[in-house]
Amino acid sequence: MTDSLIGRNLLAGAEPDPARDAGHTDAPPRVGFFTDTSVCIGCKACEVACKEWNAIPEDGLEFTGMSFDNSQGLGASTWRHVAFIEQGKPLGMTHADVDHSGLDVLALAAQGSATPVDRAAITPTTPGPPTADGRTELRWLMSSDVCKHCTHAACLDVCPTGALFRTEFGTVVVQQDVCNGCGYCVPACPYGVIEQRPGDGRAFKCTMCYDRLGAGQEPACAKACPTDSIQFGPLDELRERAAARVEQLHDLGVADARLYGEDPGDGVGGDGAFFLLLDEPEVYGLPPDPVVTTRDLPAMWRQAGIAAAGLLGGLAAVFAAHGRPGPSGLAALLGRTRRR
Amino acid sequence: MGVRTWIQDWPVYRQLSGGDPLGRGAAAESRQTRALTARTETADRVVKSVCPYCAVGCAQNVYVKDGEVVQIEGDPDSPVSRGRLCPKGSASLQLTTGEARRHEVLYRRPYGTDWESLDLDTAMDMVVDRILRTRWETWQSELDGKQVNRTMGIAHLGGATLDNEENYLIKKLWTALGIVQVENQARVCHSSTVAGLGTSFGRGGATTFLQDLQNSDCIVIEGSNFAEAHPVGFQWVMEAKARGAKVIHVDPRFSRTSALADLYVPIRAGTDIAFLGGIINHVLSTGSDFREYVLHYTNAATLVSEDFRDTEDLDGVFSGLDEETGHYDVSSWQYEGADVQAAAEDRDSLYDERNAGNHGVAESGRSESHGSGGAPASSRAQRDETLQHPRCVYQVLKRHYARYTPEMVEETCGIPRETFLEVCRALVENSGPDRTSEFVYAVGWTQHTVGAQYIRTACILQLLLGNIGRPGGGIQALRGHASIQGSSDIPTLFNLLPGYIPMPHAHQHEDLDAFVEAVKAEKGFWANMRAYVVSLLKAYWGDAATAENDYCFDHLPRLTGSHSTYETVLAQLDGTCKGYFLMGENPAVGSANTKMQRLGMAELDWLVVRDFSLIESATWWKDGPEIETGEMRTEDIGTEVFFFPAAAHTEKDGSFTNTNRMLQWHHAAKEPDGEARSDLWFMYHLGRRIKERLRESTDPMDRPVLDLVWDYPTEGPLEEPSAEAVLAEINGRGPDGAPLGAYTELRDDGSTSCGCWIYCGVYADGVNQAARRKPHTEQDWVAAEWAWAWPANRRILYNRASADPDGNPWSERKAYVWWDAEQGRWTGHDVPDFIPDRAPGYRPPEDAAGTDALAGDDPFIMQADGKAWLYAPAGLVDGPLPTHYEPQDSPVRNPVYGKQQRSPVRQLLAHHHNPMHPGPGDPGSEVFPYVVTTYRLTEHFTAGGMTRWSPYLAELQPAFFCEVSPELAAERGLEHAGWATVVTARGAVEARVLVTERMTPLRAGGRTIHQIGMPFHWGPNGHTTGDAVNELTAMALDPNVHIQEDKALTADIRPGRRPRGPRLLDLVRDYRERAGITASTGTETKG
């Protein structure tokens, strides 16, 4: 087992079984979320069920004006977030060929997923042509976002305390008794999911209800979801189901339907929580091509190692010249410190 | 811990020795992580319950640990919800265990400036004192020479959020005390549903059940924000959609429901009768009706009286209109040859009951008494099976709707012709022997001055298309409280007794027989009404009710007109009504014209509020809007206020009746904390104390109380009465005291008792059938063994109509109930809604009566003629056929009948705080140029009492807002996310502005119509606060059932926040003056 890991880059590239590679020898099949936004009714049951189960505090009563989105985005106290996007596009028969080249993706990302206040009623995508009576048709996209539980999770890779860890289910969880609030994970996440809770300092995010999984129960959000927009199950099964659903929607003329985050070949090795979207990811406030921010870490470490070796060699030479013992405790560099 | 274990527990050791070299998995697990256990796993008990919010009736599992509720989530076994919950249901742990709940009794003494504490026992005694004193002071034995035996000094409001058993005790005790002003949310939400469905089909409940939506080929959602207000029920729309059904949403606003529809049709608020009338015209003029169904199962062939004159003949009004009084004499609307007077033994009561010659009866909400029994009409009227006779219903209908052309629909509703015809085509293509379409509606249809007629229009259309009583068909009335169907069935309503038996009206010398004779039908199961009434009286008064004393029929107080919640407000204002109970209802926010609600309460001697938190109806004397404006000063208000904390659904046993007439039992998970108590406890112990206090009384007015059966067993340290014992009384007992199995066992000789005849069978064999929870995975899709539905556990009503006249399924695809000739019985997937062994070919002899008179092809067994009514010859006071009238306040002249703007018989409550707007084109009408419609959001519930205090829900929708189109925003300079003030002649409110293309300006009546959407959940108290939209609405009512029109009104909108203090009054006064509003504005009968 250990042998097979030697020489592999565990931080990027093909990774069919992240749980086993994280030392869970008898790991059950990897589980995940498939969020089919085409049937989301924007009820936010997922947000509430999540908060109830995980006892997450209410985090602010702010009327944003961003459609019906008042929780604004994922954060330390919002582990499920429903985005609302009002678009001048026809219902049902969505266009596959809508041009997004004029979009300012960074601006969209900065505003979160919904229409910004000063651009309300001006849709972020190109409206369809007006109908005979002069109206443009409208559609209202809703999508429940969540931590992606990446195959290659940068938050976990950078965590210096071991608070973030890969569970036997292949999910990524913050251990609150370990987290020291250093916040390294926050910029590491390519999706902007994980966050430190103000007043507490520790980092919080979706655990995929790790405690419920251990009891053989599905996560609270998936259980509550009235239309099964949020589906939970073994990832392989979900990927099959999702592929079939996309095909079905294409057959129905919804050419816009596409999967997001299901591809094990993408920059994060595929998401444990992936989505069926009806438009470009940017429209939902999702990065179009996320890459695990620690992808190049092994190469960087190699370079650092060479540099360090050179340095050590130099030092040793210097010390040798002075007849003093070499530095000890090198092993500590390999291990990790823990918060006490 | 040994050293070895200690070392092995060190993550670095694990990292180096195990399969996790990077220390990102197994090696990094902390001790706490390894010890993690779901609290659902460690719970001591899982208690079966039902969600307390809307009427979908989602099943809940309540997890209890150490006597406390630790988690509430969906029960996957439920066939309705399949384990899912909406955000409100998901927040029910916070609702029941959160900090917002009060657990102590509070008392505000007259003219007091703050709450004081009071112990529960003293408070109960004080309430008893006040009831008895007020009752004594205001007792009426007679009124105008007629016996009434009642008090108008006490009123009650609330019941739709309570259990059936609680509603039963409320109605029982109040009735015995002579309190007639008993009302609940059903009045303001769905009373018009009961009148509309009841007069059309014979029963006032939704004709089908939620899961059956999946069998539909086309679903039209209109007057309902289904996905938002009933999210978990909406899963069945999604199921249908997945199976290829077409989903159409017709609504003034593009809501979350529209977002999931295949076709969204924007409509001008208040014009649905024109739209549906247009479809009726399309169906009739293209011959697209399901002719065999229509001919056999409806009254299409029946001839209408020669005296009848249609709106076509009289410029928009029907024959019989008395312009002076604003009432119809309905006698000319009868069937040909039907002479109701001929059967009269007691001319006074019978004639008045049936012809509304006595306006008191007409006003007393009698239309709502067809909740489980149709209106009286001749069962032997002439028919023309060729449908050619000019006076047959079919031809009358055709003429009546001929002017509802696509052009008229466009002009009236603002719906382009092509879109309208697309809806027509979808419905016609998806109806017939092989296909079915379903209509879904909610309060978008009911809350109008012509609310009952809205429902009637849908009934007519669905009958013409042959969609009633069939799988995937029907009319789904979505009701909005956990047991609002139950609080109609076991009514806390002034005009009804349990099972839709009308409350008796005051007449000269009316005895039980005369009462029954006047109300019952000649044919069908409503002909057995005497058995239902006598059994109810036996349940109320037990051994005291004997044949000799007419089974205590005179113990029932009598009505003299309408005593609805809105009339009660007037009675409070004029000092007649002095005491008021509010149990789980918040009229200071939720009822129309909230200012009058509060001013009325300020005139009371005493007020009792039972709720979870300090809702606006409990605190208006301290911090209400009138205190802010200076209209009232706390120290001048003499109302004594009692606040009793209520128990939650998790703290009591009882049943809720969901939107599809299904009773589901919820079990107590724990006892309520502090002084919180169930309403069952409150009513039982109140009644017990009152009976104790009156024990020595010989006063005749106390006889009904002393005779009252009030002997429920109690259990536990709190002495909680047994809800199951109450359910058993509701179910009824036979001569041997054993539980009855069906209402067909009820007798009119006093040998049976039954608290609500339509619920008879819910405790069959002594088993609580409502508590049945066989998982849906272990039964067929109808899931008949999950809980129990009235009547007789039928899930689709009128299902005899799912078979053709010969008893065969109309098609294999739509087979549901059919005749098994070999067995000589009806059989199928559901309990047949028919006499089980009555052959399809059976024709009753001439002289047959009652159920014997039902022919084998009379599927509507509660109707007087066994047929569904396209044309309603009786039962409604505002017309036998639905006609488009404009809302009370409308910016458009009625395009359909230019000479009749509004319903001539709409009910307006005259009061200087209830002014109406000028009609379109009249001077001043331009002051209120925009249309306002109100609605629900997913994240909140009704008047907010159960959601605004919940942090998890409040943060999702944290502010009262209004939705406007970009065009209206530009026209009025409204800033997105800024503030706007919306003004009517009744009041002004401020709201945040949401500018959205989901609001579409429409072209109608020759002009551009801007509509403003406003959710009605907010009020000044709670975690999220805001103005209440009902400050704007008027008491303009449907005359059948007294429901208010708050789904379509006019208003002005201006940028910025509203003025504070007295300047708010100045603003509204200024608007009234500019519009030239007087007491007579908008009140004309004709024109």
Image (spheres, coloured by chain):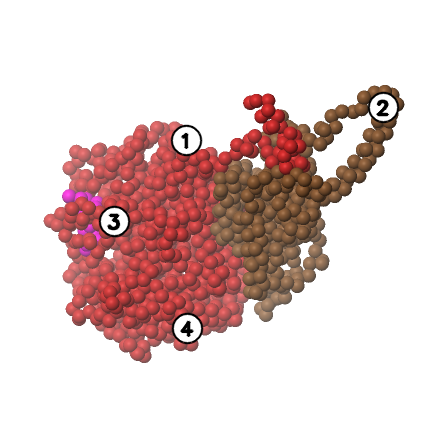
Chain colours: A brown, B red
The magenta segment: B530-543
Residue A249 found in image quarter: bottom right
Q: Viewer-nearest of labels 1 and 2?
A: 2
Q: Which residue is mark 3?
A: B764
Name the kind of residue labelled 3 in the image: Ala
Q: Which residue is mark 4?
A: B283
Name the kind of residue labelled 4 in the image: Val
Q: Is residue B239 above or below residue B770?
A: below
Q: Residue at x 50, y 70 (%)?
A: B422
Q: Earlier in the sequence, mark 4 or mark 3?
A: 4
Marks 3 and 2: same chain?
A: no
Q: Identify the mark at residue B168; answer none if there is no mark.
A: none
Q: Nearer the viewer, residue A125 or B8?
A: B8
Q: Is residue B36 visible?
A: yes
Q: CA distance from mark 1 to mark 2?
A: 66 Å
Furthest residue toward top:
A323
